[in-house]
Image (cartoon, rainbow, N blue to C red):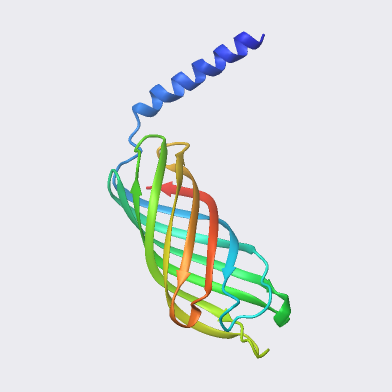
Amino acid sequence: MIARSVGLGLAWVLLWAVSASAQDYARNGVYLGLGGSYVLEDFDYSSDLLGDVDNGWGVHLRVGYRFMANFSVEFSAELLEGLDASSFGEELDALTLGVNGKVYLETGRLQPFLMLGVGMMRADRPKRNGASLSEYNAFAARFGGGLDIYATEQLVVSLEASYVLPDGDLEGLGYGSFGWGLQYRF
C-alpha cells in the first residue's frame, strides 16, 4: 500500500514537471496581485518615539509588467491599519507606495526572486511628549525576496519577505513585512 502510494506520488510529480516544461511561465505581460501582510515593527524608540507598538496585519496590491524572462517592474501599495500603540492610547496607521524591480532567479513553475524598490511612506508618527499622533510623508526603500508559485500559466501564489526603510520625518519607523497573495497574469 505504501509503495503504491509513493509510486503514484512520484508519477504525479513527474507528470507535473513534464507539463511545467511545456508552459511559458516567464512570458512578458501584465499582472495584478492582491494579498495580506504580517508586519513586524522595527521602530527605533531611542529617537523621538516612545512606548510599545504591537506587530500587526496589512493588505497589499501589486500591478506589474514583466519585461523579460528574468525581470519585472511593479507598482505596490501596502496599507497597515491599526497597529496597536497602546502607550499612546491610539493606533498607528501607515501607507507605503512604491515602484519595485524584481529579478527572477528561475523561470519555471517555481520562481524565486529578489526585489528592490523606492517610493514613499505616509504614517502617523508618535511624539515623545505624549502629544497625539501626527501624519508625515517620507521617502522609503523596500528590499527583499520571495517565491512565485505558478498554479497555472495565469494564477500565481506569491510569498514575499521584505523590509521597508523610511527616511526623513519617518526615520526610525522601519518594518519587516511577510506577505502572501494571489496574482493573475494577463
Q: Residue 144: x, y in percent? A: 44, 55
Q: Residue 23: x, y in percent? A: 35, 31
Residue at 28%, 43% (x, y): give it: 69
Q: Is residue 121 above or below residue 70?
A: below
Residue at 65%, 88% (x, y): give it: 132
Q: Residue 171: x, y in percent? A: 49, 77
Q: Is residue 148 above or below residue 15?
A: below
Residue at 37%, 34% (x, y): give it: 108
Residue at 60%, 76% (x, y): give it: 45
Left or right: where 143 falls relative to 79:
left
Q: Quadrant of residue 62?
A: bottom left
Q: Residue 159: x, y in percent? A: 51, 48
Q: Quadrant of residue 89?
A: bottom right
Q: In this figure, what is the number of numbered marks?
A: 0
Left or right: where 68 falls relative to 94:
left
Q: Residue furthest left?
A: 68
- Residue 44 or 88: which is nearer the viewer? 44
Q: Is residue 130 above or below residue 123?
A: below
Q: Quadrant of the N terminus?
A: top right
